[in-house]
């Protein structure tokens, strides 16, 4: 068999019609009543004609028969008005009255056509069979007993002997009633079960449609001819397709231009039936931007001679990728911190010995001016190296050691006051704190250091007057990147209108020893990153050269003791 997908303009294959089952289904109650009403009218007219033509010799009998027929017409008219005009549901009482009228008409016919020997006595069977289906069992039994009594009365009034044939008819009446009642009950039960299954199927379909329409993943189905069979709103948004106009049309060429990986998975499913359990790809938007997707496909073939339909499920994994990068960054920082602590301890003691020895040599009598100048230079560089080692140790010791409820707004105000007193803070700079009092479980000193570092970085990067805004408040759960695991998040933003972050260091901003400021150690933001991680939080940054920078921190309101282990 050729494995290439058929041409998009090939004639569609019309599936053969489904064969219906051979099971018999009960007619509806309204239809049965309509049949009974029509038969009743025929009987009533026949009785009325008989009364007017054949029984004129007995005016009293004709009068009684005519009254009975008119009563039957009246009951039938009322029944028609109630069921089809007022659209009422026929109940047991209504049906029992109709049964009595029908049995009365049949009894009248039987009485005037031979009584117990009347060939029309078989009409009792028809009436009982119909009402055995319509009535509940208890009401049907009463109707059956009434039919037997009326037949007995008709036979007794006829004057003839009630022989074996008569009682055989009575037995047949009740036997037929019992059989039809049992079958009717079983068919009603089967019909009720079928209705329940149909309702459940409709409910499941509605739920499935609702899920597909509202799921956060894109769902797209392409048939064996490469035509779009289904697309949900999320897939429309991610791929930039209009399902209302594209369904039923070839779509593979468009998908290839938007995501070659998605196209390749769909084509592999159509050609060979191959399913993809997990894959990644890139979707390119019309504006030139792109984003990563995770996808999987499944195939469905109704006929092995046809190419299968392929359904792809995919979603935007930009946030997942970003979180993965953040976790990798945290792991790298942890490794660097361990190495920094080891190096700092190994270097600090020899450095102290070198500094002390140089000071003693410079202080000896006979040391010249050149020696003292060189000794001073060595001491200053040793002090600078010692400060750098202290920063290494600070970087390696970042831990949320004293966790307690603190007001994040008060911590921010204290950190801003500290920065305002710093020599690098320009007098014309404006630093503001906005937001309500926000309680959070945290290490107050560590959070103070985080905010102070971010605000001081903004001031130092500006090199002059700058506006820095610190805002605090609860965050929407939808604001936090998915997969971060932060519950009841608190958001802290530090935004400035400074020069922005150069593009060459933007991707490496939180790496140790990366700094955009001359003379910086490059450990400040790395310490901030580790402090936020120590609080089970997340920090992100957005920046544009010449427009400013915004650092956003998401912190959990609290975390359980198990998370500290």
Image (cartoon, rainbow, N blue to C red):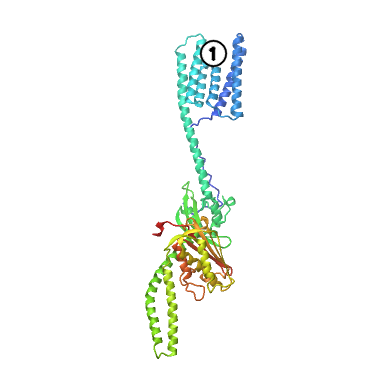
Which of the two residues, 270 or 539, is positioned nearer the viewer here? Answer: 539
Which of the two residues, 84 or 339, is positioned nearer the viewer here? Answer: 339
Q: Is residue 162 above or below residue 191?
A: above
Instruction: Give the class, few, some or many, for how many residues have Cα within 10 Å of label 1's Cα (few <14, many ≥20).
Output: many
Q: Is residue 495 above or below residue 64?
A: below
Q: Is residue 381 visible?
A: yes
x, y percentage for residue 165?
46, 14
Q: Is residue 310 above or below residue 33?
A: below
Q: Which residue is mark 1?
A: 111
**Numbered disc 1: secondary structure:** helix
Residue located 47% across and 24% down the image:
138
Residue located 62% across and 13% down the image:
52
Which of the two residues, 360 or 54, is positioned nearer the viewer here? Answer: 360
Which of the two residues, 101 or 283, is positioned nearer the viewer here? Answer: 101
Q: Quadrant of the C terminus?
A: bottom left
Residue 237 left/right relative to 395: right
x, y percentage for residue 517?
52, 74
Q: Is residue 264 visible?
A: no
x, y percentage for residue 175?
45, 21
Counting the numbered discs, the total is 1
x, y percentage for residue 63?
61, 12
Q: Is residue 564 above or below residue 158?
A: below
């Amino acid at each position: 068999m050729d494995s290439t997908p058929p041409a998009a303009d090939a004639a569609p294959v019309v599936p053969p019609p489904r064969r219906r089952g051979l099971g018999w289904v009960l007619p509806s109650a309204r239809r049965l009543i309509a049949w009974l009403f029509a038969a009743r009218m025929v009987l009533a007219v026949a009785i009325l004609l008989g009364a007017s033509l054949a029984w004129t010799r007995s005016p009293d009998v004709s009068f009684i028969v005519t009254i009975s027929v008119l009563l039957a017409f009246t009951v039938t008219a009322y029944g028609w008005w109630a069921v089809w005009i007022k659209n009422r549901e026929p109940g047991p009482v209504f049906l029992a009255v109709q049964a009595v009228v029908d049995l009365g008409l049949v009894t009248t016919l039987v009485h005037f056509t031979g009584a117990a020997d009347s060939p029309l006595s078989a009409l009792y069977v028809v009436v009982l069979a119909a009402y055995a289906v319509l009535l509940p069992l208890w009401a049907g039994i009463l109707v059956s007993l009434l039919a037997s009594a009326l037949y007995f009365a008709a036979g007794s009034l006829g004057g003839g002997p009630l022989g074996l044939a008569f009682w055989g008819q009575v037995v047949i009446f009740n036997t037929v009633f019992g059989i039809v009642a049992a079958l009717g009950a079983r068919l009603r039960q089967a019909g009720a079960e079928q209705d329940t299954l149909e309702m459940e199927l409709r409910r499941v379909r509605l739920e499935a449609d609702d899920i597909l329409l509202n799921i956060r993943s894109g769902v797209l189905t392409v048939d064996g001819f490469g035509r779009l069979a289904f697309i949900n709103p999320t897939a429309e948004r991610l791929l930039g397709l209009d399902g209302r106009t594209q369904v039923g049309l070839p779509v593979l060429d468009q998908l290839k231009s938007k995501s070659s990986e998605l196209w390749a998975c769909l084509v592999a499913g159509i050609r060979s039936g191959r399913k993809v359990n997990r894959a990644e790809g890139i979707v390119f938007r019309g504006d030139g931007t792109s984003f990563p997707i995770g996808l999987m496909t499944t195939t469905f073939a109704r006929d092995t001679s046809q190419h299968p339909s392929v359904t792809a499920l995919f979603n935007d994994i930009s946030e997942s990728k970003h979180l993965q990068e953040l976790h990798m960054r945290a792991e790298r920082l942890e490794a660097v911190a361990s190495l920094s602590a080891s190096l700092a301890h190994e270097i600090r003691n020899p450095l102290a010995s070198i500094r002390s020895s140089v000071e003693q040599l410079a202080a000896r009598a006979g040391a010249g001016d050149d020696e003292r100048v060189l000794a001073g230079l060595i001491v200053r560089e040793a002090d600078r190296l010692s400060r750098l080692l202290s920063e290494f140790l600070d970087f390696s010791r970042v831990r949320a050691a004293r966790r307690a409820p603190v007001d994040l707004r008060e911590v921010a105000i204290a950190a801003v006051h500290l920065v305002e007193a710093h020599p690098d803070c320009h007098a014309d700079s404006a630093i503001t704190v906005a937001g309500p009092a926000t309680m959070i479980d945290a290490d107050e000193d560590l959070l103070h250091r985080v905010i102070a570092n971010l605000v001081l970085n903004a001031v130092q990067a500006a090199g002059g007057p700058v506006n820095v805004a610190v805002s605090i408040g609860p965050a929407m759960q939808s604001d936090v990147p998915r997969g971060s695991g932060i519950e009841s998040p608190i958001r802290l933003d530090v935004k400035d209108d400074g020069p922005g972050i150069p593009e060459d260091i933007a991707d490496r901003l939180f790496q140790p020893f990366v700094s955009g400021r001359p003379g910086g150690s490059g450990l400040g933001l790395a310490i901030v990153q580790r402090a936020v991680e120590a609080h089970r939080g997340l920090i992100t940054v957005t920046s544009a050269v010449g427009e400013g920078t915004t650092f956003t921190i998401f912190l959990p309101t609290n975390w359980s003791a198990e998370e500290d282990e």
